[in-house]
Amino acid sequence: MDSREDMERLIFFEATREKAAANYARCPEDADNLTQWGGALLELAHFRQGQDQLNMIEESESKLREALAINPKKHETLWCLGNSHTAHGFLLPDSGKANEYFKKASDCFKKALDEEPKSELYMKSLEMSAKAPNVYVELQRQVLSQQLGIGGSGSGSGANLSAKKKQNNDFKYDVLGWAVLVLGVVAWLGMAKIAPPRAL
């Protein structure tokens, strides 16, 4: 994605967040508004680093839980909260805590699927959430390997290099799967904001 598209996304989700905050001041019991707010915060978190990113994801989770307190069966909110928990898990250095968030995400995706059983997006999200702990371990391994300077030593057999390449490709596809999932959130939020034209 180029920087122009990133800037457009940033502007779009910042405007969504501001609008949701204004709507919340007028009507704090609007679960749809809280869901949009939580989703916008999750997207904006991708533009942050470190503790700022984690804080924004936690704020996203808070808004989404607030929406579920109003409407516990709102499948869109459950799904969005699952994505937020997944993102939260990937940012934690402790695998035990990360797995707790992956479990929460899985539970949210299951509940969303229970409410909307024909949703392919929710089915795919549930499938991907089952892979999250392994992707997390691989990501941590690669980060550690890069920090130690082991990653590009070039002193391995052809079979080892082939296995490493396959493992790296699998990892890339898993990460791409998560990226597609997040883009699904973006598309869903965008479509949710566009009302169909009224007949005159």
Image: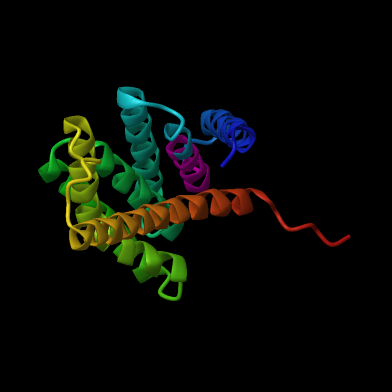
> Left of 114 or right of it: where is 47?
right
Residue at x 16% of width, y 32% of height = 148
Give the answer, above or below, for where 91 lies relative to 49: below
The total number of labels drawn is 0
Residue 196 place in picture, x, y as percent: 73, 58
Q: Nearer the viewer, residue 75 or 151?
A: 151
Asked if residue 114 lies in the magenta stretch, the reply is no
Residue 110 place in picture, x, y as percent: 30, 65
Residue at x 25% of width, y 55% of height = 132
Examine the image and state in which quarter residue 188 appears. bottom right
Q: Nearer the viewer, residue 112 or 9?
A: 9
Most distant residue in the bottom direction = 118
- The range drawn in magenta is 30-42
Residue at x 56% of width, y 35% of height = 13
Residue 162 place in picture, x, y as percent: 26, 61
> Left of 69 or right of it: where is 137?
left
Residue at x 34% of width, y 37% of height = 62
* Quarter containing the C terminus: bottom right
Residue 171 place in picture, x, y as percent: 30, 55
Most distant residue in the right direction = 200
Q: Nearer the viewer, residue 96 or 33?
A: 96
> Left of 118 or right of it: where is 66?
left
* Quarter containing the N terminus: top right
Q: How is the image coloured?
A: rainbow
Examine the image and state in which quarter residue 140 appears. top left
Examine the image and state in which quarter residue 191 appears. bottom right
Asked if residue 36 lies in the magenta stretch, the reply is yes
SS majority, magenta: helix
